[in-house]
Image (spheres, helix red, strand yellow):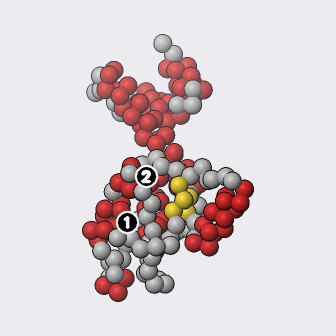
Amino acid sequence: MNENSTVEKMRRLHLKTMAGLYHQSLTYQHYSHCTTDELLALLVDAEWEHRQKTRINSLIKLGAFKQSASPQNIDYQASRNLDKNVVDRLLSLQFLDKVENIIITGPAGSGKSYLAQCLGVKACQFLFKTHYYATSRFRDKTKLARLDGTSPFWRLWSVLGKVR
């Protein structure tokens, strides 16, 4: 068996991560202690994880988020009036399974946009297609959709009302 031929075939099949890891295993004998089944599982897992990460990053990019929002960076200061339990429930994304809408309100600087973007990024990590809009842009989009009789292909998340 020609190992270089196998690596080349993997690349042509667009299994680039798998091909790279297999090439490393041949070159440096990193996985010589593995059985054939273990090596195959390792190669498939590496390719799968790479593709999932690529897909998530693509969904985040398409989501048009204005900042890199992370639930770990949510500020729960008393002045912001954020209930950690409510935020944690929202971050579970159960409202998506129930096909429910959420509306986030609060004074300027209270973190509405940041929270909406955290939810959007989290949804992307679970392979939901999302798109971030500021309120004014969301209103324009919905007015246009109503006028021409179309509806958006993706879930629209608005920052209009109050989370309860």
Identify the residue shown where x is 50% and y is 73%: 160
Quadrant holding the C terminus: bottom left
Q: CA distance from mark 1 to mark 2?
A: 22 Å
Q: Are marks 1 and 2 in contact (CB under 8 Å)?
A: no
Residue that sits furthest to the top in the current view: 1
Question: Mark 2 falls on what kind of element?
Answer: loop
Seen from the viewer's position, the closer of residues 12 and 35 is: 12
- Amino acid on which disc 1 is placed: Pro
Write down the quadrant of residue 110 in the picture.
Answer: bottom left
Residue 71 - label? 1
Residue that sits furthest to the right in the current view: 148
Local crowd size for mark 2, using a 10 Å CA cut-off: few (<14), some (14–19), many (≥20): few
Seen from the viewer's position, the closer of residues 44 and 134 is: 134
User: Is 78 left, or right, of 122 in this rendering?
Assistant: left
Residue 48: percent from left, percent from top: 44, 36
Seen from the viewer's position, the closer of residues 148 and 136 is: 148
Looking at the picture, does residue 143 appear above or below residue 109?
above
Identify the residue shown where x is 35% and y is 54%: 94
User: Is 91 left, or right, of 107 in this rendering?
Assistant: left
Residue 122: percent from left, percent from top: 42, 57
Local crowd size for mark 1, using a 10 Å CA cut-off: few (<14), some (14–19), many (≥20): some
Looking at the picture, does residue 4 appear above or below residue 83?
above
Residue 108: percent from left, percent from top: 49, 84
Question: Mark 1 falls on what kind of element?
Answer: helix
User: Is 149 left, or right, of 6 in this rendering?
Assistant: right
> Label 2 belongs to which residue?
99
Residue 73 in view, yes or no: no
Residue 75 in view, yes or no: yes
The mark that comes first in sequence, 1 or 2, is 1
- Amino acid on which disc 2 is placed: Val
Residue that sits furthest to the bottom in the current view: 79
Looking at the picture, does residue 146 appear above or below residue 129?
below
